[in-house]
Image: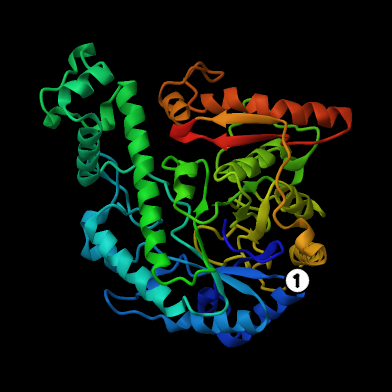
Amino acid sequence: MAVLPAHVLFGAAYYHEYTPTYDPELRPDERLKTDLDLMVDANFTVIRVGESVWSTWEPENGRFDLDWLQPVLDGAHERGISVILGTPTYAVPPWLARQYPEITGERRTGERIGWGARQEADFTHPAFRFHAERVIRRIVARYADHPAVIGWQVDNEPGLHLFHNHGVFQRFVDHLREKYGDIETLNRAWGLVYWSHRLSTWADLWTPDGNEQPQYDVAWREFQARQVTEFIGWQADIVREYARPEQFVTTCISYTRNGVEDDEMSDRLDIASGNPYYDMQDGLLLPDPTPDDHEQVWKTTGVWSMYQTADWMFSSRQEPFLVTETNANSIGFCWDNRPGYDGQWRQAAWAHVARGARMIEYWQWQTLRFGAETYWGGVLPHSGQPGRTYAEVARLGAEFDKAGPLVAGLEPDADIAMVYSMPSKWLMQKYPPLSKPDGAPDPASYHRIFDPFYRVPSTRAARSGSCTPGSCTTRAAGGRG
């Protein structure tokens, strides 16, 4: 278990590096002071910084700028605010993409992902690893001894893509060779006599793009998740070379991503962390109005599903966890803008703490005026002036401050355990046992089977007037289920 303060950490992701282009009317140092003072008034105890801006840390190949974060850490420390510092490896700088185009990830064999978003790089490629390791070492060596830093987040929401690059596929073949020993053993284990798929040599193994053999498919998905786990563990080991013993190492998990096997990944970390996003307004009504066929993806709808995500985070290590991101306001896009009703921030935050959260950290401090997430509302709006969201969050911060150690490290007391099997989910995504209303195969079949067992207790309890949503804990069992 990570070493954490004896209270629930409370704060937000903070990107002071956006300030020069964000608010030209204020000098960056004035904005920084204003922001940090507002955080103190809201009883913030933690901020997360640095994970999104590799091109700021290293503007050109081999030229580093590491000092820009110093005023943020110094100012936070002066005010008693702790810092979680992130490694910036999930967002590749343009110079790296230009100089090493071979690191471009492929969604299918030969089909490159376009640049301009994030996580487009094949993180297994040696050129990427060289540059990633170099920037990680520079940043961590520079700030590991800063007294504000209590922990490290490596990368950010890993596992977005399944990479089909040539090097990745060759490592898959090597993995199978090591696991099965010889080609005939693989032929027997996978039943490759079927449809004349018996291999005569390892070079006969086909790429996954047109595969219809379920044995192959689940092996490929397990391998992909193992690459993500290895990548995160690799970063964690580098950070630990510099980190102080009391500093923890984690990563923020988006639990529905294709390359995530959360229990194995969390084994390489000191504490599990997750990013539970949820619909506010009527999305938190009881009784639950969510249609039975609603697919829960990167954000959830319904109180029961928010609790399920919290239990999922707890189950990663069977220990309390960190909420590294959650919505400070309306999330999503310009056409779907639903800021919370008064009190919903408190309801959601206390729900997560009741299920084991040791930190509630919003994304993000201030709403951006640029970029793909311009409509992801922050604690402060576009104007940078405190408003209703800030008032709600500050009220919650005062409650956490008053509660102190009484609510730190709560663990759910459940009468039911549910086993969550990643291999089963992977197979059902490609070979769904259920169909959609139009008769098409439903890749969300696993959750359509799993979720009703989780959802029923909360629905019945809500209808009876005694709501205890999420009364079951889950175990993200993966291959160990």
Count neighbours of disc 1 (C-alpha within 10 A) and say few if under 14, some if 14 to 19, many if 20 or more: many
Vertical placement of 258 versus 433: above or below? below
Residue shown at 46% from the left, 65% from the top:
52
For label 1, the SS is loop
Q: Quadrant of residue 285?
A: top right
Q: Nearer the viewer, residue 334 or 465?
A: 465
Q: Quadrant of residue 358?
A: bottom right
Q: Is residue 284 left or right of residue 137?
A: right
Q: How is the image coloured?
A: rainbow
Residue shown at 62% from the left, 81% from the top:
77
Residue 9 spot, x, y in % from top left: 67, 64
Residue 479 spot, x, y in % from top left: 43, 33
Q: Is residue 11 left or right of residue 211?
A: right
Residue 208 spot, x, y in % from top left: 27, 31
Report if residue 31 is visible in the image: no
Instruction: Please identify the quadrant where the N terminus is shown.
Output: bottom right
Residue 191 spot, x, y in % from top left: 26, 16
Vertical placement of 199 versus 387: above or below? above
Q: Which residue is mark 1?
A: 42
Residue shown at 76% from the left, 65% from the top:
397
The amino acid pointed to by label 1 is Ala
Q: Hey, which residue is sitting farthest right in the picture?
A: 465
Q: Quadrant of residue 283?
A: top right
